[in-house]
Structures are given as structure tokens and as C-alpha cells.
Image (spheres, rainbow, N blue to C red):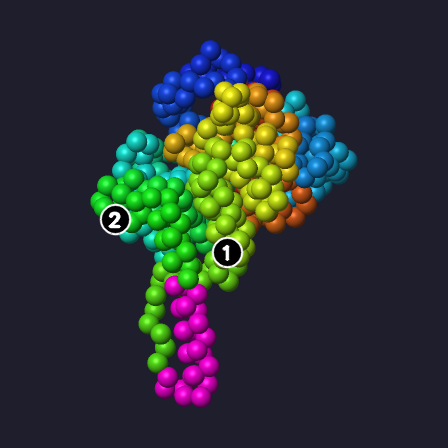
Amino acid sequence: MSKSGEKFFRLWFLNWLPGGGKASGNWPLLSFRIVLSVGLISLFFVTGLAESQSGELIAITGARILTAAGQSYERGTILIKDGKILDIGAEVKIPAGARVVNASGCLITPGLVDAHSHLGLGPSGGVTEDNEMTDPVTPQLRIIDSIHPEGVGPDKNQFLHAVAEGVTAALVHPGSGNVIGGQSAVLKLRGRTVDEMCIKFPACMKMALGRKVFYASKGQMPMTKMGTAFLVRQAMLEAAEHRKALENYERERKKNPAASAPPRDLKKEALLLVLDKKIPVHIHVGSADDIMTAVRLAEEFGFKELSLAHAEEAYKVAEELARHRVKVVVGPRMITYDDQNRLVNLADYLHRRGIEVSIMTDADVIQQPFLRTQAAIAVKYGMDPDAALRAITINPARLAGVAERLGSLEKGKDADLVVWSGDLFDIRQPALRVFIDGREVFRAPGLSEE
């Protein structure tokens, strides 16, 4: 660990890490201790940083670089200009006039990307803005209309805390209270408004299978798993009928300009994005039977792409998921136990069977800053570190449809990166600097500009 990293570690991480060690399952203690550090983190953002300008030429030198694109450099250099990576490698020439950041002894990775978050939708354990529980089918809802860009209540600084732990982007979804919850968005964790943060909307359609206890308690469909699947099918078929009506109208209008258009239907229009393969579908599932229901629906309606969230029993049907090229987002639960009570490291198990895996926090179930801790748990139980890195960088970027910009360190991509004091999966090693779009948005205390 660098000296600056040691200083930061003493000031902050010892304040909340149980036993000063690596990933622990003691989430209540972790959550309690990170709350104690809120003042410190806020102070670091206010007093520790003179934000760089996006047009500034910056050279970060001397660090080990993990690109998440298949290459690594033991002592590499990254050139940043106009928010993009201008060059990267072991023998990059530094132009005259560049601001040089000496990162010797440190590690650089892409900014971390969370594939499944509810960041900015309300405080932990409180009333949240992610579930509109008045109708089980709400594809017309837009998550960008619920996100508070600073966080809410006791989680008011949750965006800042996430950035301080290296999270630079998140795919933010509606909740899972409804069968079809609405449209998700990809945010970069910078900017003052949701409009400034949002880089892709709609990113996908969020759905959820399984029995919906809330509606069952009201005596309303869905009361069973088959009722849940029926509502998805019904909504998709009604959207298909709406498309036919629109097509008929267009044909009729050519013959009769006074022809009446079908009435607007925001629900059906939203689902046409799915039927027309303009956006993928992301489904909350748990059990193996619900997982296979999701696969059947994807096949029946020709989803552009299917990704599953949580999917604790995905290991039971891993071969089917691989065959159908289904992506899986693992978390917050990282390990489970099979029917013989044997431990299953879910992310590693699925990765080894050819499934593209991302790792999530489901923030604020697990607070957003703990994304790399989630990956560290997978590594602790045997996942290859390179695979774990991809699961919190390029894989979620691909799932979110923004891999051309985010998720790996390559020429021409957005300069979203993190300088760590040491090993990414040793959570005692803090983030020292975080860059988003080439701007230094976080710097640990005690670090100079260079």
C-alpha cells in the first residue's frame, strides 16, 4: 500500500471494516460503520479536490493497469484528453504540457459499473420510489422520473459514497413489486441532474416473476406464479395487437388522409420497444422454475436479449441458460447452498459454464459503495480475479448497452477509471483517485494534484 493509501486507510477504512480484514459476511456491522464515515467522505469531496477540466491533457503514469479488455500493463501510462482515453500502454510518450499524475505502486482499473441498482430512489429501509404498487403491469413508467440525483434522507450522499469506492456508472431499475415494473436507465455518477447523469434511456424493460405477495393479499391477480406469467403474456399480446392497429392506420391513411388514428396507449407503446427488439428485458427471478419461465417468455416473444437478476437457483439450470445465451446478474447474495448443503459460489459457477456474469449490489439492499466487496466475496470463494473484474466492469457495460463507451480501458473510450492503492479485491486498499469523463471527481485526502 502506498503511503497516501495508508493514511486514507487509517482515516476511513479502519472506521468500519470488521477486524480490518477482507470481505466479511457481517453486513449489518459494515453498514453501521460506513454511516460513521459519512462526514469524512463528504469532507474529502469538498476539501480534497480541485476538479480537473475535461479538456485538460492528463498522463497517469507508473501504475499497474488492468484494462478488462484482455491486456494488462505492469508499469503503464494512460493519456486522457477531452474526456476520452487518448492512448494507453507500457510505452506511451507523454506530450509536453500534460499534467502528470504519478501513480507508481498503484493499480488502475476501469470505473466500476453496477448492473442492478436502485440508487437515488429512497433511503435504506424507508419509503422508496421504485415500485408503483397500484397496478402489476406498468411498462410505461420511467425510472428517470423517480431518481433523486443526490440521494434521499439518511442516504443523501449515496452518490458521493459510491464514487469514493470506485463506482462510476450504474444501471438503475424500477423495483420488483410489479410484474412489469418499467423502463431502466444507465447513469454516470456525475452531474447535478438526472438529465446530466443519464447516458442511456430506456436501457431495458424491468420485469419480475414469482408469486406477488402484495397483490395476492389484495385478492388481485397475480396470486400465483402462473398468474404472473399470464400477465406478461397478456401485456405482450395486447401490445402486438396495438402494433397491428397502428400498421392498419398507416395503410388506411395513405388512402384516406382523414382516417382516425388508434388512441394513444402508453403501456402498449412501451412494450413495443421490447417486441420490436429495441431494448432488452431484465427479469428478477429466484427459483429454477421461475428462471425457466423467463426463458420461455424470451423465446415466445423474441426478446432482443434476456438478463436475469438474483437467480439464486441458476446453478440448477446453468446448461439451459448457457444454451439460450442468457446473462445473469448475481447478488446481493453471492453464495448459496445446493440440495446436498454444498457451498455454491454462484458467480464463479455460472462463469465456468460459459454464462456472461455481472455482479451487483441491488443498492440499497447492499449499499452502492460495496460493489467491489461483492466481487471480493466471489474471489474469496474461488472466482478468477480477471473474471471478477469483468463482472463489475465490461460485462455490466455490455448488458446495459454502453460497452462502446464504458467498462474497459481502451483508446477512444470514456476516461472513467479508478486509481487504487493496491489489489482491487483487498478491500483494505482504498480508491485514491476516481475519474469520470476525464475529470477527477474524487481524490483521497493527503494526495497532491500530481
Of residue 300 and residue 398, the one placed in the foreground of this image is: 300
Task: Write down the region rendered in magenta.
Answer: 238-259
At label 2, the amino acid type is: Gln
Q: Position of residue 213 (x, y in %)?
A: 29, 39
User: Is residue 257 found inside the magenta-colored segment of the image?
Assistant: yes
Q: Earlier in the sequence, mark 1 or mark 2?
A: 2
Q: Which mark is residue 352?
A: none
Instruction: Estimate how packed mark 1 is, as few (under 14), some (14 to 19) or many (20 or more) residues with alpha carbons within 10 Å.
Output: few
At label 1, the amino acid type is: Glu
Q: Position of residue 98 (x, y in %)?
A: 66, 39
Residue depicted at x 53% and y 39%:
328
The image quadrant of residue 425 is top right
Q: Which mark is residue 300?
A: 1
Residue named by callout 2: 220
Q: Is residue 332 visible?
A: yes
**Quick check: 2 left or right of 215?**
right
Is label 2 in a helix, a strand or a loop?
A: loop
As drawn, 285 above or below 125: below
